[in-house]
Amino acid sequence: MSGHSKWASIKHKKAATDAKRGQLFTKLARAITVAAREGGGDPDANFTLAAAVEKAKGYSMPKDNIQRAIDRGAGGPDGGAEIERVIYEGYGPGGAALLVEALTDNRNRTGSEVRHAFDHHGGSLGEPGSVAWQFENRGVILIDADRYAEDDLIAAIDAGADDVAGDGDLLKVTTEPAGLGAVRAALEESGVEVQSAELAMEPKATVEVDSEPKARALLRLMEALDDHDDVEAVHANFDVPEAVLEQAAA
């Protein structure tokens, strides 16, 4: 059982609650606005924007909200111009590498708060480049494994997906970043309902965390980072045995 993939499952369930209280949609809208400001408002010509829109669709963000966020970013210098992208890198309990993507209007404040989260939960914030080399940018699509089998996702392979794999209660489709939209569309056209579709920093290798206390502390750290208003995404390379992970997540 891949702990990283299990985190994706936990995060997706948590995101449904976040969406209900508006927190998730606020983060998604900010990412779309910044992408549109940086590269223009046409998703066909702006890959970062296209990926942000795909992620928003994966979490059922209304089309009107998506378009307003695009218009806000593409409309001029006031469209989120004060917000910048920042990457934080560090290690969590058990030696897991963590990569934190943030969108912030105050780098000093966000950096201080991210460092506090690492320190409070037994991790350590590192220098830029300290863990990024352990990850690669991939398109990741999640499917409910209770409803579909791997054989139901042939359309993804035909559309250029690199891999389809079962992992617990999820099926995970991975693609080249540029192929995310096409693979998602192919799945939907074949009748498969997509739970989420987004760009993610997938680990090249995993670190096993087989201690329940360390696994629990690691999940608490990731939850604390994910809950931060400025944090867009949290990526990690941990691998936790199923029994240990269930105890830690309880």
Image (cartoon, rainbow, N blue to C red):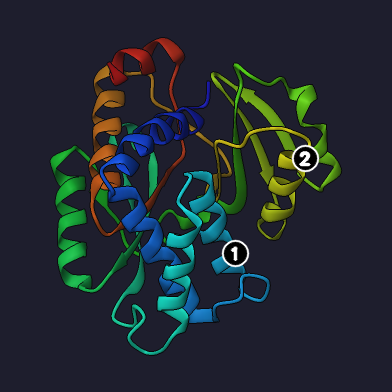
Closer to us: 73 or 175? 73
The answer to whether 21 is drawn above or below residue 69 in the figure is above
Expressed as whole percent of the image width and height from the top left, the position of residue 191 reads 74, 33
Q: Residue furthest right?
A: 158
In the picture, measured across the screen, residue 20 lies left or right of residue 64, that is left
Q: Earlier in the sequence, mark 1 or mark 2?
A: 1
Residue where numbered disc 2 is placed: 156
Residue lying farthest to the bottom in this orientation: 77
Residue 129 located left or right of residue 94: right
Quadrant in the picture for residue 247:
top left
Question: Residue visible at 40% across and 57% down?
Answer: 28
Extreme residue toward the front, this view: 64
Direction top: furthest residue:
243
Looking at numbered disc 1 in the image, what kind of residue is underneath it?
Ala
Above or below, 166 relative to 80: above
Residue 117 placement, left or right of 187: left
Q: Which residue is drawn at 30% across and 45% down?
A: 226
Q: Is mark 1 on a helix, strand or loop?
A: helix
